[in-house]
Image (cartoon, rainbow, N blue to C red):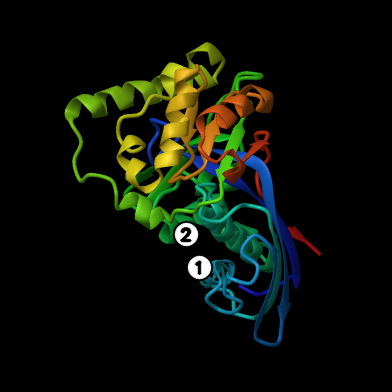
Amino acid sequence: MRIEHTRVRVQVPATSANLGPGFDALGLALDLVDDLELEATTGGVEVLAEGEGAGSVPTGEEHLVVRAIRRGLDHAGAPQTGLRLRTVNRIPHGRGLGSSAAATVAGLLLARGLIADPAALDDQAVLDLACEFEGHPDNASPALLGGAVLSWTVGDVVRAAPLRLGPGVLRPLVLLPRTTLSTHAARGLLPAEVPHRDAAVNAARAALLVHALAGSPELLLEATEDRLHQEQRAPGMPQSVELMRVLRREGFPAVISGAGPSVLVLAAAREEVAPLVRRFVSDPAAWRIAEVPLRETASSPVVG
């Protein structure tokens, strides 16, 4: 496999995983994107980052996008090359919006754009390789495919099925705190076992959520009930979980976005939620509220 193109660009979106009961299985893409431009060179590695993470992320081989590019080229049997990478990062880091999944998918797609035969890094390969980095596909799948996606694994193979969405069902609202929380720390708060009754409730709610997304928005509140991971993570993000509880008591389908600490409301307007934040949060200025539409288009590299 040879390197055919020397310049590649890609946009990859933020994602929100779990959506309440769909732990490690459900996710959606948000129209908040990182822009990346790559040039293959004869030199070493140069990373120029703007926006989120600028000044704190690695600027060499340890950069996550660079590592993903290297893995993608190896998978395709293509030679390694010097890299000049420029990123404009808009996805907040450490907030449960899939920044690491976006970086991984972006790197693999940039590698696809470099090589002569893109089929060597098709969507299935990208999902499988992304899970080597991420461990689970609920962020990587929507980052690649767009829309809302149901993901699962069969052995080491990732499967992903885009969900059919009813018109106007999703009106995502993201509540972003100043604080951050690593996925590793959030997972460390989860128990090794859960009661059978709670598992059964989550299975029913996850199925109901797929139905609600297809065209029954009135069921979203009930469909987003979770008993497996959100309350269990409250010690690591008490304000986020309390805000989620308040919003749900007021009838909004609010969930913790991914591993948190951001809160996602599947259907709401900013003017509906802002008064509740001012009323119930001790430091409302520590939260930013953003209406972020669903991103329905798939991510794909553009060469030249």
The crowding category of the residue bearing disc 1, from other C-alpha atoms within 10 Å (few below 14, some 14 to 19, many at least 20), is some
* Residue 200 placement (x, y as % from top left): 25, 24
Q: Which of the pair 275/90 is nearer the observer? A: 275
Residue 174 located left or right of residue 19: right
Element at badge 1? helix
For marks 1 and 2, the one nearer the N-term is: 1
* Residue 300 shows up from this direction: no
The crowding category of the residue bearing disc 2, from other C-alpha atoms within 10 Å (few below 14, some 14 to 19, many at least 20), is many
Which numbered tag is attached to residue 301?
Answer: none
Residue 148 located left or right of residue 291: left
Q: Do the residues labelled 1 and 2 touch (CB within 8 Å)?
A: yes
Q: Which amino acid does label 2 sit on?
A: Leu
Which numbered tag is attached to residue 129?
Answer: 2
Element at badge 2? helix
Which numbered tag is attached to residue 75?
Answer: 1
- Give the number of the mark in front: 1 or 2: 2
Q: Which residue is drawn at 44% across and 61% down?
A: 133
255 shown above or below 138? above
* Residue 72 placement (x, y as % from top left): 55, 66
Kindly report the distance in space between the C-alpha atoms of the residues bearing marks 1 and 2.
9 Å
Q: Quadrant of the N terminus?
A: bottom right
